[in-house]
Image (cartoon, grey):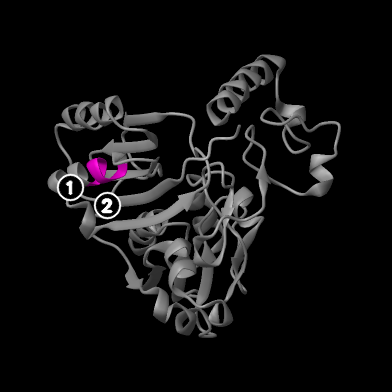
Amino acid sequence: MPNQKHYRVVAFYRFVPVDTIMVHKDALKEISKTSDICGTILIAPEGVNGTIASSDDGIDRALAYLDQHFEISKGEVKFSHASCTPFLRYKVRAKKEIITMRTPNVDPTKRVGTYVSAQDWNDVITDPDVLVLDTRNVYETKIGTFQNALDPKIDVFTDFVKFVRENLDPQKHQKIAMFCTGGIRCEKASSFMLNEGFETVYHLKGGILKYLEDTPPQKSLWQGECFVFDKRVGVHEGLEEAKHLMCYGCRTPLDETDLVSPLYEEGVTCPHCHAQTSEKIAARRRMRHQQMTKISA
């Protein structure tokens, strides 16, 4: 029978100077020994970032530790839910950056753009003088975005730097409003853009998830669904689970045509990535899919 456990899901981040990273990594990993917890936590010198889920007290224990050592409650913490195990396992990783940009001198702990609350976001993005910029990857923007937003069509966040330098001009684009899933990429992107000479940079506090949570559907300017990085694939108003499937090979959301293609193999490949997938990689994905199926059984 399918796993009937109810999982609380929490997405969080905070840019804050961190030392003794390995000590924190080991302490957070200990939680999995006595709790049903899954997901990933990243720790780097610039802060902490993660999305985890639990059917028991695992989330509460993890957040208690994160608040004690990093004051995570002063950052962004967003709750939702899932009807089955949303992640394969629990991982705590030490990284050079919690959001990879590979751009020197970008430090959100020292300089960021202007936060805009979900309640005020509509007023900002309907200003004709404001360029609305989606900072997410193309497979995320495929299933939903804000009205009239510019999609940079980037494959990974590190490409955002090149897109800005080649397509945007601080003299021409004097007001920019950025958004992403939970707010973390925008926070780092805003620091970068201020360094590049852009004068007024807004970013949606709490990201799309906070907007969907707080904004009544009749007032929402969001179109479609919000891609999330777990088995739910997408959420919509009220952070309810959407009805989308995703290729776990390339993370592309799939439509009905994709699902009936002979190039689609559940958990392995789809028409969007089949040609670039070697048999060795396909075999590894099949094994991973079998593991995930067993966990959900």
Q: Is residue 253 magenta?
A: no
Q: Is residue 254 left or right of residue 288?
A: right
Magenta stretch in the rendered image: 59-63
Disc 1, SS: helix
Name the residue nearer the viewer: 125 or 263.
263
The answer to whether 219 is drawn above or below residue 54 in the figure is: below
- Name the side, left or right, on which 246 lies relative to 88: right
Residue 33 spot, x, y in % from top left: 28, 24
When asked about the image quadrant of residue 98, the answer is top left
| Secondary structure beneath label 2 | strand
Identify residue for label 1. Answer: 70
Type of residue at label 2? Answer: Arg
Separation (CA) of disc 2 from disc 1: 8 Å
Q: Position of residue 171 (x, y in %)?
A: 46, 74
| Disc 2: CA contacts within 10 A as few (<14), some (14-19) or many (>=20) | many
Considering every residue shown, the one lying at the far front of the view is 1
Q: Is residue 46 visible?
A: no
The answer to whether mark 2 and mark 1 are in CB contact below 8 A is: yes
Placement of 240 over or under 61, stated as above or below = below
Residue drawn 71% across the image and 16% down it: 279
Q: Which residue is tagged 2?
A: 14
Residue nearest the observer in this picture, 262 or 244: 244
Residue 258 image point, x, y percent: 80, 43
The kind of residue on which mark 1 rests is Phe
Visible in this render: residue 181?
yes
Q: Considering the image in quadrants, where does the N terminus appear?
A: top right
Residue lying at 62% horizontally and 40% vertically, measured from the top left: 251
Q: Residues within 10 Å of mark 1 (few under 14, many from 20)?
A: many
